[in-house]
Image (spheres, grey):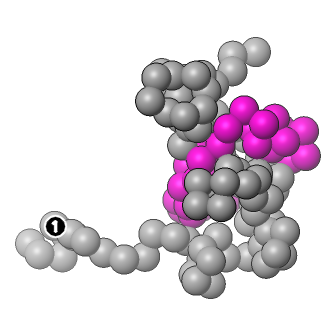
């Protein structure tokens, strides 16, 4: 099995993990994984991340109850980014929003 490269220069052992709702392809969040959180995710079937701000493991949903059931884990062509398809059990964002991506910066379709 091909594994992510957690040791690429400048990444501090962390790689981005893009989390997508398996039911509708909506991007829910971006978080970071180290090798241990990646292994916990594979072993438990729920998402685990490394919190850069707290410098600690973060089991998504442990506090909020908004767990993410992993359906599929994909690795990009450079082996340094993960795409994780999940079935969310509630909002992904700590604000209570369904997705963390709700603040528009530019929308050329609306400006045309």
Residue 25 appears in the picture as rendered:
no
From this viewpoint, which residue is outermost toward the left?
Answer: 112
- Residue 79 lies left or right of residue 40; in this view the side is left
Give neighbour class at mark 1: few <14, some 14-19, many 20+ (Cα, 10 Å): few
Magenta segment range? 17-45
Q: Is residue 87 above or below residue 1?
A: below
Q: Residue 96: which quarter of the image?
A: bottom right
Q: Is residue 13 above or below residue 79?
A: below
Residue highlighted by disc 1: 108
- Residue 106 lies left or right of residue 8; in this view the side is left
Q: Is residue 51 above or below residue 97?
A: above
Residue at image position (58%, 38%) is 14
Residue 107 appears in the picture as rendered:
yes
Residue at image position (51%, 22%) is 8
From this viewpoint, which residue is outermost toward the top?
Answer: 1
Q: Is residue 97 above or below residue 52?
A: below
Percent across and percent down for residue 106 are: 21, 69
From this viewpoint, which residue is outermost toward the right?
Answer: 44
Percent across and percent down for residue 67 are: 80, 66
Percent across and percent down for residue 66 are: 78, 73
Q: Quadrant of the C terminus?
A: bottom left
- Residue 73 lies left or right of residue 66; in this view the side is left
Q: How many marks?
A: 1
Residue 112 versus residue 64: which sits nearer the camera? Answer: 64
Residue at image position (73%, 54%) is 56
Residue 37 versus residue 110: which sits nearer the camera? Answer: 37
Tell me if residue 44 is in the magenta stretch. Answer: yes
Q: Residue 22: which quarter of the image?
A: bottom right
Residue at image position (79%, 78%) is 64
Percent across and percent down for residue 36 are: 78, 37
| Badge 1 element | helix
Q: Quadrant of the N terminus?
A: top right
């Amino acid at each position: 099995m091909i594994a992510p490269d957690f040791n690429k220069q400048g990444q501090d052992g962390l790689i981005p993990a893009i989390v997508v709702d398996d039911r509708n392809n909506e991007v829910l969040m971006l978080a970071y994984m180290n090798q241990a959180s990646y292994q916990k995710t594979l072993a438990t079937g729920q998402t685990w991340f490394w919190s850069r701000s707290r410098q600690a493991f973060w089991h998504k949903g442990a506090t909020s109850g908004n767990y993410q059931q992993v359906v599929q884990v994909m690795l990009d062509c450079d082996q340094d980014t993960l795409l994780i398809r999940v079935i969310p059990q509630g909002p992904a964002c700590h604000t209570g929003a369904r997705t963390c991506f709700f603040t528009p910066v530019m929308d050329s379709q609306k400006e045309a």
